[in-house]
Image (cartoon, rainbow, N blue to C red):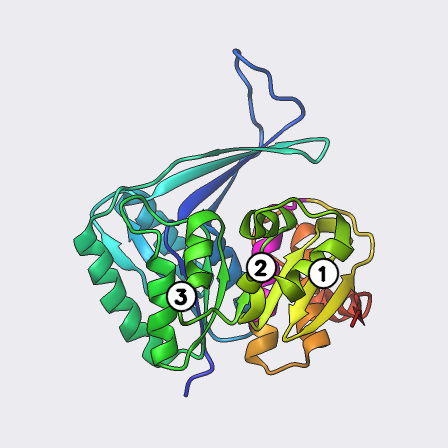
Amino acid sequence: MSNKILAITMNPSVDISYPLDHLKIDTVNRVSSVTKTAGGKGLNVARVIHQLNEPVSTSGVLGGTIGDYISKQLNEVGLQEEFLHIPQESRNCIAILHDDGQQTEVLEAGPTLTAQQQTEFMQHFADLLNKVSLVTISGSLPQGFTTDLYAQMIEAAAKQNVKVILDSSGDSLLSGISGKNKPLLIKPNQEEIAQLVGRKLAGLSDLQTALLTEDIFTDLEWVVVSLGKDGALAKAGQEIYRVSIPKINAVNPVGSGDSTVAGLAVGINRKESIPDVLKTAMTTGMLNTMEKETGHIDPALFDEYFAKVSVEKLN
């Protein structure tokens, strides 16, 4: 079997970053430097996997002139593009980066697709599964596709013994973990965990208890809860791990969660130990935050920062 990772982005975009000292409302804002990146969470995942020299290809649905731009950008960085191409136009997503580290986003919804296109995509996806050992599914669904699409994809992958990492939210996440076949790993934040269990969580001990006792997590092998600058709390089997990271100089936090998913995928694909998988993931997340470019790391710094991550088993 191939050891290639397939990174899925169902609703890709061109991500446009505008750095601004101060966003002025109801008047002109002039931007001196603009960054345009082939975007969408799964493409960030794929880029970082590629930078770690792990074999990866990208898929989802892509269309129009924006789709052509994304396809061209992926080819330029050597990423294999295996999208289902559609006649509708893909989307732009704008991030306004404030000088105090905050960020305002304007996200287009993207194309509205048909039931026929969903069927076509599922056939396309089933073909791609023959060539991969692990799939990452990231982000939102395009309009017109049913909220159980990720659950369908997880089921299709299970039939071919392909593991799935699911990084989504809302109904598509809930549907993705509610079927008979489960993803290997999910990476929610604390807010998404609270939504899944239907209550507010009072601190890390409550979060730990929820991961071990709530039925919704019972059959999930991995749940990695990102805590931003405080690292992560992770359930692996019935074990809970607290992951701590050093203070770093944050340049651009956009895409750090996706870079963390990339690290998880690479660590699992390389059959690393549980602590090393978590350390790889936190390292790639940190390295992305230290770069201006979204979904980008400097592999030369990997070993240095990997050594600074600490993992403690809590139970």
Magenta-colored stretch includes residue 261: yes
Q: CA distance from mark 3 to mark 1?
A: 24 Å
Q: Residue furthest left?
A: 116
Please report the residue visible at 37 percent of the width from the left and 74 percent of the height from the top: 157
Give, as a three-letter code, the residue at label 3.
Gly
Image disc number at residue 208? 1
Can residue 287 be seen by looking at this rendering? no
Q: Which residues are magenta?
A: 252-265
270, above or below 206, in the image: below
What's the distance in space between the residues labelled 2 and 1, CA to CA? 15 Å
Q: Which residue is mark 3?
A: 179
Report the amino acid beneath label 1: Gln
Residue 174 in the image, given as x and y percentages of width and height: 46, 55
Q: CB atoms at circles 2 and 1 under 8 Å apart?
A: no
Q: Residue at x 41, y 61 (%)?
A: 8
What secondary structure is marked by label 3? loop
Q: Position of residue 290 (x, y in %)?
A: 71, 51
Q: Earlier in the sequence, mark 2 or mark 3?
A: 3
As for residue 101 lying within the magenta part, the answer is no
Camera-near label (2 vs 1) is 1
Q: Which residue is mark 2?
A: 187
Q: Residue 217 location in percent, x, y?
A: 57, 64
The amino acid marked with disc number 2 is Lys
Name the side, left or right, on which 266 lies relative to 141: right
As helix, strand or loop, the secondary structure at mark 1 comes to helix
